[in-house]
Amino acid sequence: MSVSQIFPKSLPVSSFFLAFRGISTTSSVCKNRKCGVPKVTPFRTHPLTYEEAQPPSKIYVTKGWLSWNTSNLYEEKRHAETTFEDLIIRKFMFGTWHGILASEVVIKRRHNMIVLAFLASMEHALQRQVYFLQGYTEELLTNWFKCPVKVELSAVSSKNDVIFKKI
Amino acid sequence: MAAPLLRSCRLGASLFTAQSQTANKVSQYSTSESLVTSTGKKDKLYRQLTLEIKGHDSAILNSYQKFTAMAAKELGVNIVSMCDPPRIFTRMSLMKSVFVHKKHFHQYEMRTMYKVFQIKHITGSTASTFLEYIQRNLPEGMAMKVTKIQIEQLPSHIKPPADAANQIQSSQQTTKH
């Protein structure tokens, strides 16, 4: 099928370029793109928490880890299982506590227990909603992972309280 | 049968004065050999407990070592050595490109630091109490391996040769006089 079949000759030439403009056939520009380092906005209005403000290279220097478990120690088991469970927990927390989470969730494992620690902003949430969500989270995750899950949340009055800097 | 008060484990207190030679041997333990547990069985004797602890963060390991030493001191548990064996770094190299673009080479590493505590001469009840206390306070991201060396009696079907048995008997008689 040729181009002339798709675009009849009656159409202007500009429409031809318009249709094919989206496809780039040149090789990609391999710039050194950093992951985990947010870009600065034109007027420096984007708020960041302390956790987000530290680049990944500062882990173990100015900030700690978000998952605390023994699976990555030498000669220990369950790397993949632990990582995948943590992923599910983070997804679940993001959806369940939508708009309430004011920080990342720290997942701590000791023995067979999972402890979830995070900040909850009370700006748009009622107290009884938070109590419900706490029980809901513990109950569901406990049943899914077949081990006790505890929620240890700290409340902040608004997300403005956790702004470390604006970029 | 020992008095019920003495039946519970007395951490660290040397309660009993050695009355015979056999009692002398076990007097270094925190409880006497003659003590029986509530189920009527004799308490176990451990010659050595080895606690191997590993974690990612040396600061937490040091803190835990301090805690364990303090707990052992308060409870009178005899920790003979606390050492840190060589650490192990597991490295993962990441290079998306097969050949060029060495600028984008990344290396991730998982650090494992160790601590080894050795406890000598401890009874079963003391060991279980002490271990439960320190294990319940084990922080997140730290693993512990406990190796126990228990003292067992010779099985009844193994007996010393006749000469040796006579010698033991005669030596016991002399000590009684």
Image: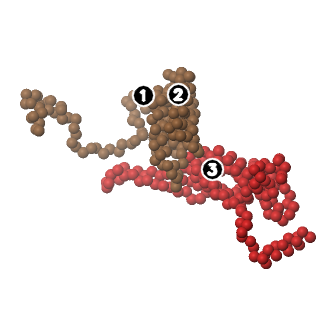
Q: Position of residue A3 (x, y in %)?
A: 11, 36
Is label 2 in contact with label 3 (beta carbons under 8 Å)? no
Residue shown at 71%/62% (left/top)? B151
**Which mark, residue A133?**
2
Q: Is residue A58 above or below residue A154?
A: below
Give the letter of the chain under mark 3: B
Q: According to the colouring, which chain is brown?
A: A
Residue shown at 47%/27% (left/top)? A99
Give the letter of the chain under mark 2: A
Which of pointers 2 and 1 indicates the residue nearer the eye?
Answer: 2
Residue shown at 58%/52% (left/top)? B54
Marks 2 and 3, how far apart in space? 37 Å
Marks 2 and 1, how far apart in space? 31 Å
Q: According to the colouring, which chain is red?
A: B
Please name the amino acid that badge 3 sits on: Asn
The residue carrying mark 1 is: A45
Applied colour scheme = by chain
Please name the amino acid that badge 2 sits on: Leu
The residue carrying mark 3 is: B62
Q: Position of residue B120 (x, y in %)?
A: 71, 59
Which of pointers 3 and 1 indicates the residue nearer the eye?
Answer: 3
